[in-house]
Amino acid sequence: MEQKKVGNPGPHPARMPAYEGPLTAQRLEEIFATCGDYESRRIDFGLEGRLFPTVCWLDGLISGGDVAEHVIRPLTQSVRAEGVQTEKDCLERLLRGGVTSYSVKCRDDLDQLLSDLTHGSCAVVFDGLQAALTFELRSDKSRGISEPTLEKSLKGAKDSFVETLRVNTALVRRRICSPKLKLVENCVGRKTQTRVAVLFVEGIASQDTVRELARRLDALDIDALLATGALEEYIVDRPLSPFPQLIHTERPDRFAMYLMDGRIGLLVDGLPVGLVLPVTFAEFMKVTGDSNTHFLVATTLTLLRYLALILSLLLPALYVAVAMYHQEMIPTRLLLSIIEAKQDVPFSTAVEVLSMLIAFGLLQEAGLRLPNPIGDTVSIIGALIVGQSAVEARVVSPIAIIVVALSGIACYTLPSQDLGSAVRLTRFLLLLAAIGAGLFGVGVGICLLLLHLADIDSFGVNFTAPLSGGEPCGLLRLLLRVPKPLNKFRDPLLKTGDRRRQK
C-alpha cells in the first residue's frame, strides 16, 4: 500500500515524545514492567559469544512461532555472522536481509520503537548503538471476512469489512486496482495510537477536501479512538446536529463506489466500518442495490423511500393537529368513526399518540439490546398482546395505534439507521409542536427543520444539494436514477478533478 503525507500539519500532542531515556533493552523492561504479554530474549548472534542483541515483542500481537522461525533462528545461524565484528556490522547485515521478514525499519527513537511494538512488530535492540531494527510479524488471528449483516446484498459482493485495517484496505484495493488509489495513514489518540487510513483516488478526489480532512485529523487531541463517534463528532462541520454527516458502510464495494465518485474514505483500525465524506442528504436515501437494478425500478424505489420519510416524519404530528384543532378537515364518515372509537378512551389524542410513540421506541430498543430469540419474542409480545390488550381495554384507540405503527414501519424503510434515529427524534419534536399549535406549529417546525438542514455543510458541500444549488433540474436529479450509459459525468458539487466518468 502506498503511503504519503498530505498537507503540512504542525506539531500534534499525540506525536510529542511520551517516553524519555536511552533506547536499550533495560529501558524497555522498565516501560513494560507490569505487562504480562511483553516477551524478551537475549540472543547470542551466530552463537560466537561476541554480540548479544535483545529480541522483544508483545505476545498475541505476534505469533511466538513466527518470532522463532523468522527472527531468532536467522540470528543464531553462524553463516550469517561471518565477518561481523561490531553491533554496527550486525545491524547492517540484518538490514541487508539477515532476518527473513518482508518489512524492516531502523529506529533510533524510543517512541517510534514503542509504536512499532504495540502495532505488531518484533524488535532487535542493540544497546551499544541505542538503536533497534523492527520486523513486521503481525499475527493473522482475526475475524474472517463474512457477509454484511446490516446492508444486505442481493446482486452485489458478499464480503464486508472486518476489524483489521490492513485486511480492509486490501478489500478496497482489490476493487480499485490502480496506483491512483492513495492511502495515507495517521495515528489518532495519545494513549491508544489508533491507526486511521485516508483513502482517495488521485485525480478524481478534490485535493482541497483531502487537505482539509488531513488538517482536522491532525488537530485531534484525544486520549482514545475506539468508536466511530469519537472520530465523527470531531471532524464534521455541525457536531451538534442530530443528522448524520458521514456515511457509514460495512460493504467494500459501496465504499469503492464512493471513492470512484470523487469522495474520500476513512478506515479505522479495530472498527469493521468505513466512513465516507463529503455527503448530502440524498446519499442517505440511496442503497447500493439501486446500481444493480433497472433504472425505472431504482427510481420507483427511491420515490417510495421519500414517501416513507414523509410519512414517518409527519404522520403522527398531522393526525394530532387535525384531530385536536382542525376536525373540519376530516371527512364526515371518518370523523364519525374516530369519535366512535374514542368514546370510551379516557385519554386525549395527544396523550395517546405520545404514549404510543414512547412505547414503540421502548419495544424497538428492547428488541435491539436483547439476544435474538428473546428480542423477537419481546417484539411479538409487545406488538400483538400488549397492543391488542390496550385496544380491548379502551386505553388507546385503534386509529392511534394504526398511525404510530405506520409511522414506525415507514421509518424502517430508510436505508441509514443514523438517519432513522434523527427522524425519530424530529418526529417527537414535530408532535410536540402539533400539540401546542396545531398545523401552524407543524408548519413552523418544518420550516425550522429545512433551515437547519440547509445550514449544514459537509466539507464544502451543502447538505441539501442539489435542491439548494439553484439547479433547474435539481429535484429530478434527486429522485431519478439516470441510465448508466447516459450518466457520463460525476457530481459537480464534489469539485472532482476528472469529471468524466465514461466516454
Image (cartoon, helix red, strand yellow):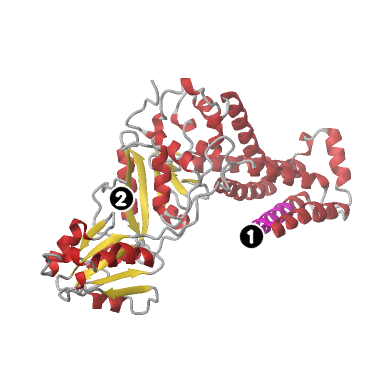
In the image, taking residue 90 as reference, residue 252 lies left or right, namely right
> In the rendered image, which residue does mark 2 sit on?
215
Residue drawn 45% across and 43% down? 456
Mark 2, Cα crowd under 10 Å, few <14 / some 14-19 / many 20+, is some
Mark 1, Cα crowd under 10 Å, few <14 / some 14-19 / many 20+, is few
Q: Amino acid at mark 1?
A: Arg
290 shown above or below 445: above
Q: Which residues are magenta?
A: 354-372
Q: Earlier in the sequence, mark 1 or mark 2?
A: 2
Residue 50, image x, y percentages: 15, 75
Quadrant in which the C terminus appears: top left
Q: Which mark is residue 65?
A: none
> In the rendered image, which residue does mark 1 sit on?
369
Nearest to the observer: residue 248 or residue 314:
248
Q: Amino acid at mark 2?
A: Arg
What kind of element bears circle 1? Answer: helix
Residue 8, image x, y percentages: 23, 49
Magenta span contains residue 346: no
Residue drawn 10% across and 69% down? 85
In space, the residues marked 1 and 2 are separated at their CA atoms by 37 Å
Residue 295, image x, y percentages: 56, 25
162 shown above or below 466: below
What kind of element bears circle 2? Answer: helix
